[in-house]
Amino acid sequence: MSVADIPAAPPATGFARRHAWLAVLVVGAALFIAEERTLVATQNPNLVPSAILLGASIVPLAFVAFVYGRRLPYRVPGIAVAASAFLGGVIGTIVAATLEFDVLRDLGGLPMLGVGLIEETSKLLVPLALLIPLRQHRTRADGLLIALPRFARSTLREAL
């Protein structure tokens, strides 16, 4: 019996890996507070974009660490995840911007609920378009992995 014949045991998820999201959240929050205090103390406007980007990326990064620490069974190809992040950002932005502009132009400022609905629905277009042809990837973990980059990118885009 060779080493290749022995089935590999699933990797154990240690406490540190499983709870790494807490470290990401705490360190990110500490960095944000330090940057915010520096911004207030120095009144340096060059720190504003950095503070916005850091503040907007802490929670999505902590969520990525949370999902990574769970060791869920993924079968989605890496190209699908990359396509979700890239195409989702571009297509979602174009669809949301066009439809939001049309709603605001035609109906005025009142139907902001419709604008919010359009914006949130446009975030689902690319993950849905990727999951339909990839029918063999129908586990919750696969759907989460395809949708996660799209929503993280959307959070950063909206903050900026």
Image (spheres, rainbow, N blue to C red):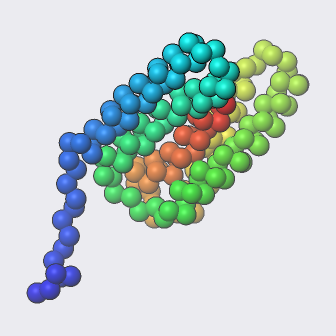
Q: Residue furthest top?
A: 41
Callout count: 0
Side (left or right) of 80 relative to 121: left
Q: Residue at x 85, y 18 (%)?
A: 108
- Return the residue nearer the eye: 96 or 160: 160
The residue shown at (46%, 39%) is 61
Quarter of the image for the N terminus: give it: bottom left
Q: Does 74 sit left or right of 92 as displayed? A: left
Q: Depth check: 52 or 44 in front?
A: 44
* Horizontal relation, residue 141 to residue 85: left or right: left
Report x, y in % for residue 128. 59, 51
x and y percent of residue 35 in the render? 52, 23
The answer to whether residue 8 of the structure is visible from this angle is yes
Q: Tell me if residue 128 can be seen.
A: no
Task: Identify which residue is drawn at 18% across, 73% down.
Answer: 7
**Vertical side of 114 occupied by 94: above or below:** below
Q: Nearer the viewer, residue 100 or 29?
A: 29
The image quadrant that residue 111 belongs to is: top right
Quadrant housing the C terminus: top right
- Seen in the picture, residue 148 relative to 139 is either above or below; the reply is above
Q: Residue furthest left?
A: 1
Query: Residue at point 18% right, 65% down?
Result: 9
Determine the residue located farthest toward the front in the rendered image.
Answer: 42
Place of residue 58 in the rendered image (x, y in percent of width and height, measured from the top left): 47, 32
Q: Is residue 82 left or right of residue 97?
A: left
Q: Could you say where residue 22 lies in the image, as x and y percent from the top left?
A: 32, 32
For this orientation, the residue located farthest to the right is 106
- Quadrant of residue 27 in the image? top left
Closer to us: 43 or 115: 43
